[in-house]
Amino acid sequence: MALRACGLIIFRRVPPASDIEFLLLQTSYGTHHWTPPKGHVDPGEDDMTTALRETEEEAGLHASQFTVVDGFRKELNYNVKNKAKTVIYWLAELRDPSAQVKLSREHQDFRWLPLREACEYSGYQDMQDTLNDAYQFLQGDPKQ
Ligand SMILES: Nc1nc2c(ncn2[C@@H]2O[C@H](COP(=O)(O)OP(=O)(O)OP(=O)(O)OP(=O)(O)OC[C@H]3O[C@@H](n4cnc5c(=O)[nH]c(N)nc54)[C@H](O)[C@@H]3O)[C@@H](O)[C@H]2O)c(=O)[nH]1
């Protein structure tokens, strides 16, 4: 069975034009790659509980600080060390755009990034597609 992880693509709308910025975290290990907060599903845990737990552990953002967006859920499938991994992402808007991110020891840096930069930082085609879909969804495109 594939390794399973879940997380939240957190975004904020920045005044004055409500520009959308996505939150990416940089790992403090390995290749120091950038992803939204996410992590492995614990035994017996449901997917959304994992996504909320990992977001709080990795970014210091509690569920009371954001709103999960209805109707957006993406599944990524890729291999890690020759083992299949499935990652489920939901989309969530930070209520207070000035809320502070608090990293755990798993990450060494974070950025709030507009779509194009977020895609560049991620680098993975499947995550770029997911970020683009999220952005389109937020513009009101029902196909996403
Ligand atoms: N010292 C050390 N420790 C590690 C290492 N590795 C893990 N730990 C420990 O494990 C714990 C993590 O626990 P959680 O937080 O619960 O899990 P996740 O959040 O799931 O975290 P991971 O980092 O395991 O998983 P990914 O982000 O999935 O990265 C795995 C590989 O997949 C590629 N990849 C990443 N994203 C994408 C994508 O969007 N698209 C595509 N196509 N590919 C993507 C990329 O090539 C990457 O190298 C930490 O506490 C560490 O202590 C490591 O190398 N050295």
Image: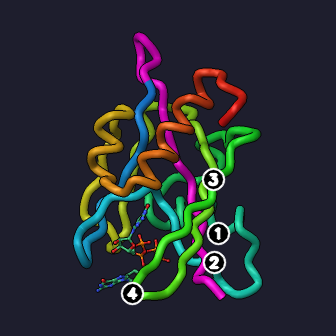
Query: Most prominent secondary structure in the magenta stretch?
Result: strand
Q: Residues within 10 Å of mark 1 (few under 14, many from 20)?
A: many
Residue occupied by mark 1: 50
Q: CA distance from mark 1 to mark 3?
A: 15 Å
- Judged by depth in the image, the label closer to the viewer, 1 or 3, is 3
Q: Amino acid at mark 3?
A: Lys
- Label 4 SS: loop
Q: Amino acid at mark 1?
A: Thr
- Label 1 SS: helix
Q: Position of residue 128 (x, y in %)?
A: 42, 47
* Mark toward the start of the polypeptide (3 vs 2): 2
Q: Residues within 10 Å of mark 4 (few under 14, many from 20)?
A: few
Residue under the point 62% across and 62% down: 88
State which region is magenta: 1-19
Residue occupied by mark 4: 81
Q: Position of residue 132 (x, y in %)?
A: 48, 37
> Considering only vertical position in the picture, is 75 above or below 15?
below
Residue occupied by mark 2: 41
* Mark toward the start of the polypeptide (2 vs 1): 2
Residue under the point 66% across and 22% down: 140
* Mark toward the start of the polypeptide (1 vs 4): 1
- Judged by depth in the image, the label closer to the viewer, 3 or 2, is 3
Residue 2 located within the stretch drawn in magenta: yes
* Mark toward the start of the polypeptide (2 vs 4): 2
Q: Residues within 10 Å of mark 3 (few under 14, many from 20)?
A: some
> Considering only vertical position in the picture, is 101 above or below 81?
above
Q: Position of residue 36 (x, y in %)?
A: 45, 55
> Considering only vertical position in the picture, is 32 above or below 126?
below
Residue occupied by mark 3: 74
Q: Amino acid at mark 2?
A: Val
Q: Report whether 40 appears left or right of 100.
A: right
